[in-house]
Image (cartoon, coloured by chain):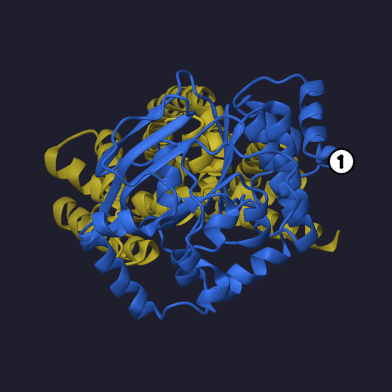
Amino acid sequence: MIEPFLLRALAAGVGLAIIAAPLGAVLVWNRMAYFGETVAQASLVGVALGLLLNLDVTVSVIVTTLAVAALLIVLGRQKLVPLDAILGLTHHGTLALGVIATTLLAGPSVDLMGYLFGDVFAVTDSDLWLIYGGGAVVLAVMAWLWQPLLRVAVHEELASAEGVPSRWVRAGFIIVLALTIAIAMKIVGVLLAIAFLIVPIVAARPFASTPEGLVVTAGIVGAASVALGLTLSANADAPGGPSIVLCMALIAGLSLAISARR
Amino acid sequence: MTGASPAEAEDHAHAHYARHQHDHESCGCGHDHGPKKEFDTSALISARGLTMMRGDRIVLDHVDVDIHPREIVTLIGPNGSGKTTLVRALLGLEDMTGGEISRMEDLRIGYVPQRFDIDRTLPMTVSRFLSLGHKAPRENLRALLAEVGAERCSNQQLSEISGGELQRVLLARALAAKPDLLVLDEPVRGVDYTGEADLYALIGQLRDQRGIGVLLVSHDLHVVMAASDRVLCLNRHICCSGVPETVAQHPEYMRLFGVEAARAFGVYRHHHDHAHGLDGRELPVPTSASPAETL
């Protein structure tokens, strides 16, 4: 009854929603949304590099994301230019570079839209292995780092004074973030990957009173948005990734409106 | 501030740096100015010659600090005087350009940071915050909150309690680790005036009951000084130090904070019912430094 490609899309989207929830929470708590956005969009350069060096795109995306994250952390230490300006510069600069390099390297036939917005209906069985296998690794690392990540999010200096190795905790988080971006790219593309992480957290916030409650609620919001978005997409012939993100944004808007009225 | 103009203060600081030794010998403010390098072994934490450079700017210049058990030491100084850098160094969060710090074996430090702006998207109750990073039974948490007078916050969200309650909760968190030394950076931020006096009274009480050493950082002069056993006045170097009365009447202090501060200090003086450990540091106030003559 349900087409296999639709089932695969659903499985991929729900998997990503579950992986994304704890990462999105940490991104939002640390006010790193724009940082995440920047490294995600820079990952298009990784796609180009993968094509150039004939590497697996997932691997080259992870490596590029980590390199850009490291660069941003180093640039964030200088005091001449504010961090948001650096992020804006990197964000647009790398996106432009990525689009040009991908097009030049792969020719006009390259599915640029697929990289930018994802192609959830083209998810293959091996992609599902990546999503669930990689996702299990991401969740395991997040569970392991959860307490220190919470303490750093509450107050980084206090956590450091209490003996939490804040830098290593953050570094570990950024590594799993890079892996998550590589996974999300398959489904919603580099432009919408971070939305998948952040928007469900915004939607869930008014209904949570513990950090873990927030993560679980966000996971449910994400999964529901995937189901709704794919239905919308299948019926209206709209692109899959953007349909999912639009549903998330609508749920978030509704949630904020409800909480504002309370 | 009614003291020296910023330009003069800058000049003075440089001049002071240049004639370090001489100035110290003549300042008569009571602490040991010699090139002493040994750590104070009776102290919880003892720092010698702490120096911090940022580029070619001197942030801290050969600062010596000792904090003993049952002692409340207050660090005062104008903005940019290096207070926070010094605290971060004592906490082990900052790599110094020079100098050494000796800590008592197994020293546990409870820290109350200056800024605490938790993101509202992070839902967390006060009791969860107190048990973050260590498993604490509920009755312990309740006892801790009772000790700081914040029992009723226990189930409230951290982002929703008042400034005064937040300071007490942060204090409870610092006490949860059973510290030997409590370090509080500007503990009265966001606290109203009466709340401020209450908070200092509480800190004094904690010292008496738990026998801990306390390092307070403040740019608020009056109430905090009256609550202290010893005051360190910092402006990149230690300008003067001693019991509050000595420091309040010291010319360096008046230069930094203005004579008004020295006069106002008397108004808020609390009655102390205990003797101060002088450690051989305190000397009588030189007559030339008395407020009457300076005025």
Residue A147 location, x and y as percent? Answer: 56, 28
Give above or below for A216 relative to A82: above
Q: Taking the image as drawn, is residue B41 in sight?
A: yes
Give above or below for A253 relative to A167: below
Q: Which of the two residues, A118 or A169, is positioned nearer the viewer here?
A: A169
**B116 lies left or right of A12:** right
Residue at x 18% of width, y 51% of height: A106
| Mark 1 belongs to chain | B
Residue A97 location, x and y as percent? Answer: 22, 60
**Label 1 sits on residue:** B152
Picture quarter containing residue A185? top left
Q: Colour of chain A?
A: yellow
Q: Chain B is drawn in which colour?
A: blue
**B249 lies left or right of B98:** right
Residue type, mark 1 in image: Arg
**B146 lies left or right of B226:** right
Q: Which of the two residues, B88 or A67, is positioned nearer the viewer here?
A: B88
